[in-house]
Amino acid sequence: MYKNFLMLFLAFMISGMIFISCSGDSTSPAVDRVITITSPNGGELLEAGTTVTITWTDNVSGEVKIELFEGVEGTEIESSTASDGSYDYNIPVGFTAGPYKVKITDMNNTGVYDFSDEPFAITPPATSDYIVVTSPNGGETLEMGTTHTITWTDNITDANVLIELLKNGIFNSNIILSTENDGSYDYAIPTSLTADNDYRVRVTGLTSATSDDSNNDLEIRAAGDFISVVSPNGGEEWEMGTTEIIFWNDNIDDNVKIELLDNGVSTVITSSTPSDGSFDYSIPTNLDDGSDFRIKITSLGDDLITDSSDDDFSIEPPPSYIIVTSPNGGETFQAGTTQTIRWEDNIDEYIWIYIYQEENFVAAYYTESDGSHEIDIPLSAVGSDLYWVVIRSEYDYSINDDSDDFFTVIAAPPFIEVGYPNGGEELMIGETYWIGWQDNIQGNVKIEFYESGTLIPESTIDNAGNEGWYEIDIPLDAPLMDGLTMKISSIGDPSIFDWSDGEFSVISNEISIPNEFTSISSIPHTGNYEIDPVGDIDWYRVYLESGKEYLFENTSSEDFDSAFGLYATSGTNIVEVAYDDDDGGNWQPEIFYYVETSGYYYLKVGLFYNVKQVKKEKQYGETGPYTLSITEIPYGK
């Protein structure tokens, strides 16, 4: 279980297929995401019941949402469609004149969106008579004693029209009994009306009786300076991390202050902005969500001129997201350099970062979701312009993002780089080790060992393959040696080679008798034990008789991968005489040992660690139970 994973991991590490991760800064810039609507973008007259192509340009990947806004009220056209620049929209027959705007939003980052620059209108189907009131059509604030131009479109032949004022859906008064059907009429708003916000205008053909009303209520208020919040005005549902437009009407010239009220508690959104009727509000992600928010807008010239939302609206947390910002396409990196992966997110859990070269997996990193993670691009990285990054949540794979386009890694010149042993190591007689290196060559390599600068011919490995590692055993009869160096060279081109940076040595396999051990008083013996804490090693002392064969094994069914080492007494030290980490079947060790000399022997037990580069007493950092069984068996069975 652990061994196969570990061998694969170490092989990747040595051959450079898994990058080494650390932290730091990057010089790679993030790419700003942009959406620009090109049609309908203002002034169009679209016909209900027909199909119109909505078009836009963008540099985003993934999906976009398309909405139709009538004033501040949005209707979803398409919840998710490819960001390919066009969408065919079948305009429903029942739609009124408007005015309308289209909004397109990046689904991966709802702060990236665009509206039509100016309003457009939707007319009824050409086969039917219609009048469509275009202004006032809802949401306006009109002031008594002023003049407002009522506008409409139609396809009727009536020479004149009747214009009426409705209040709460009921006739209130005639604005004009008959006026020319030319699409506009200047309405002098009487000062005798009752100030309220439930008025609408109706236009009716005097011959055909074809008519239309304002789509929504408008406000008529008494003369004097005023501010009237239009949106949000109650019932809206906003989302943290997005941008919403605050709308209001006023007749003042002073700048205004805008506040967010949370159950009456004020937070200033902007201390001063022009009184132009709208403000783009980027909703912070650190608000306390709730359903008792209101907007308050106040004149900076006279704080008595103010208005708040009529009712509460809600602000909710945003859906979880990850956005890759670098590398996001077009960057070029050199093999052997350090670069930083950057992203934006609103999650707390750790994330996985995956590097791909075209469709081939290259590397993986597990790190905090803190927006950046530094990687070392190995010298052995394959040169390609088809690299890309994927970042996802450790818990929810649907929370993910990838580079918008490929980036490039430029390969290093042909090289070999010794990894292990590279100077200072002590290789123990009787142990197994992995020779490790990195390279970017195509052919196999040759490994040579030198003592004090002189080649040791019998130790030369003429063809060590090109996996980035090669397993060697230090024989029990090997001499002790100092001043060793190693050279790894290309078989195809001997000019490509590398030496270990320093000298290493071969040392005795004798170690000191452990200070603490458990005595086994009799054989057969069975006992349940545990490796704990992390890195723990258990020692046992047992007396073995010459001429007999013994079996040492872990008979536990627990999924804990242990290893056994058996040591014989050698003067004041002990020396390893047998080692096993599994029996080839269930990942548990079995040692069959025939005793030639009676005496005390020492058994070392720890978690398996396939230590090809370090001494076996270093153990892999996990804990677990095991069952130690020692039995005498008929010799040779």
Image: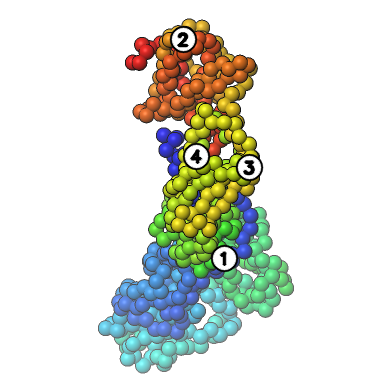
Please report the residue visible at 54 percent of the width from the left and 31 percent of the height from the top: 478
User: Do residues under tags 1 and 3 come within 8 Å of each other at their CB atoms?
Assistant: no
Q: Residue furthest right?
A: 301
Callout 2 amino acid: Ser
Residues at circles 1 and 4 in contact by the CB criterion of under 8 Å: no
Residue hosting label 2: 546
Q: Which corner quadrant holds the C terminus?
A: top left
* Quadrant in which the N terminus is drawn: top left
Q: Which residue is mark 4?
A: 458
Q: Earlier in the sequence, mark 4 or mark 3?
A: 3
Which residue is painted at 67% across and 79% down in the image? Answer: 253
Residue that mark 1 sits on? 30
- Is 164 above or below relative to 524? below
Rendered image: mark on residue 452 = 3
Note whether 580 is above or below 426 in the view shown. Answer: above
Q: Is residue 583 left or right of residue 528?
A: left
Give the number of the mark in front: 1 or 3: 3
Observer-nearest of 31 and 517: 517
Q: Earlier in the sequence, mark 2 or mark 3?
A: 3
Secondary structure found at label 1: loop
